[in-house]
Amino acid sequence: MPIPFSVPSLALPGKVAIITGGGTGMGRSMALEFAKAGADIVVASRTVANLEQVAAEVRALGRRALAIQTDVSRKTDVDRMVAGTMKAFGQVDVLVNNAGLGSGIGEDGRGLGHRDPPWLIDIPEDNWDPIIAVNLKGVYLCCAAAGRIMVAQRRGSMINISSRAGAAGAARPYSAAKAGVNRLTAGLARELGPYNVRVNAIAPAYTRTEVGVMQRPSEVAAYDAPETLARYPLGRIAEPIDIACAALFLASDAANGITGQVLNVDCGASA
């Protein structure tokens, strides 16, 4: 007689997940994989057309979907996103904070459009403000708004998309913001743990997304060059599905004992 398999499932039946930055790249991949696992999906970002396309793909998988235009750096937008989710679905079980902004290109194809100066002491204030507003304050605003719901429910999982740059990056606004995300993750985990709300982060390195690589064609060859890939023990950079699978695990009951952690999903770059 076979021995019963006792490990909890990765399935998310009856769950509702909010995914910011959900219109492209890693966000889109997470939305589709979560839907395949049985979750209903809310995708949020600044670009409505991308969101509606992903929402249609989710519905084609047999799940309910809602697209909400949201600038995560604005509290009114974030509150409206969570309120819209509650009105449509009555619960928030998973929050993925994936919306992000880089010095060149943002999560929806818009960004600052420039590089930081070589020296940290020369970086102007205008370079700091939007990066911190989206990549750090935006994560906090979303965690606070969804966290109030999760505390009342006595259940929930928050997943913050950080970066290897938060631990090993150059001294830049992006790296500083991601380091802040890591510490925010730990603090929220301690505060919300007694209410059965788990908070974790995923730290990718370079990932082959429209924003991370594919919208910078001049850099693609460098990312795939042998000398670059030699820094990755798996011999490749990450794909969106790699991040989506890690997020699905952290969202599921299989990760019920995990909180306050930063999971490196970087093909071994941090080893």
Image (spheres, rainbow, N blue to C red):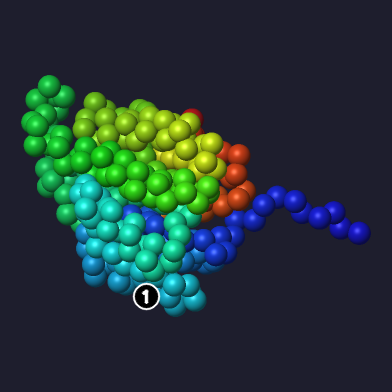
What percent of the width, then of the height, locates residue 104? 17, 46
Element marked by disc 1:
helix
Q: Quadrant of residue 124?
A: top left
Q: Nearer the viewer, residue 114 or 157?
A: 157
Q: Quadrant of residue 181?
A: top left
The residue drawn where x is 29% and y is 44% is: 141
In the image, 116: left or right of 259?
Answer: left
Check disc 1 and report the residue beneath it.
Answer: 56
Q: Quadrant of residue 17?
A: bottom left
What percent of the width, then of the height, locates residue 229? 40, 40
What percent of the width, then of the height, locates residue 158? 44, 46
- Which amino acid type is marked by label 1? Ala
Q: Which of 188 and 226 is in front in this view?
A: 188
Q: How crowded is mark 1: few (under 14 residues within 10 Å), some or many (20 or more)?
A: some
Q: Nearer the viewer, residue 12 or 101?
A: 12
Residue extending furthest toward the right: 1
Q: Is residue 176 above or below residue 111?
A: above
Q: In this view, does 170 lie above or below 244?
A: above
In the image, 244: left or right of 163?
Answer: right
